Amino acid sequence: MLNPLTYWLIVISVTVYAFGRGRMDERLAALICLVGSVMTISWSGPAHYYLDIESGILAVDILALLGFVGVALRSKRFWPLWVAGFQLTSVLSHFIKALHWSLIPQVYAAAERLWIYPILLAIVVGTWRSRRYWRQSGEINATPA
């Protein structure tokens, strides 16, 4: 995984891009990532080593999944379904740990943390494509909804 400074630079850059160029779906998805990242830090235990199920991180992941599903259900675009699917995979990693307590902590941590990067990439691509779609349809100057 990336070091924390690089991770935060990516998350903040994606959020700024989504708020600057995106519409409501892109902004909500980026905001969910940003708030989820902050909540993960505050809700995880003092030292999370991934030896047991990380209940604080699981709670954040479930809330993020609900948020992404909400965005996907209201969106006219396809990319939010990918984001919700990636987040579902992250949530399922916790259940794999519950079923297999002997799962190596590094594998659990990687399976849980990995999916934020495809989510952020999907938000960037979704923002770019949505902007292109709205520009082609002639609604680019309309107030973002």
Image (tube, rainbow, N blue to C red):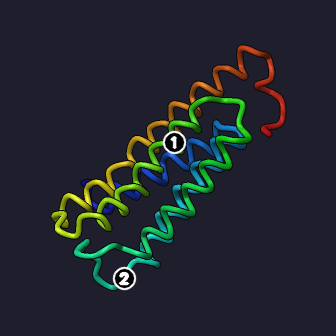
Please state the total of marks drawn on the protein image: 2
Q: Residue at x 27, y 76 (%)?
A: 52
Q: Is residue 114 left or right of residue 22?
A: left
Task: Name above or below for residue 10 compared with residue 129.
Answer: below
Q: Are marks 1 and 2 in contact (CB under 8 Å)?
A: no
Residue 74, above or below 47: above
> Disc 1 marks which amino acid?
Val
Q: Which residue is mark 2?
A: 45
Q: Nearer the viewer, residue 10 or 47?
A: 47
Residue 50, x across and y down, in percent: 26, 71
Judge from the rendering whether residue 127 lies leftward or rightward of residue 107; answer left or right. Answer: right
Report which residue position mark 1 lands on: 83
Q: Earlier in the sequence, mark 1 or mark 2?
A: 2
Q: Residue at x 71, y 36 (%)?
A: 75
Where the N terminus falls, by quadrant?
Answer: bottom left
Q: Amino acid at mark 2?
A: Gly
Count neighbours of disc 2 (C-alpha within 10 A) and say few if under 14, some if 14 to 19, many if 20 or more: few
Secondary element at image label 1: helix
Secondary structure of the residue carrying tag 2 is loop
Image spot of residue 91 (x, y percent): 43, 57
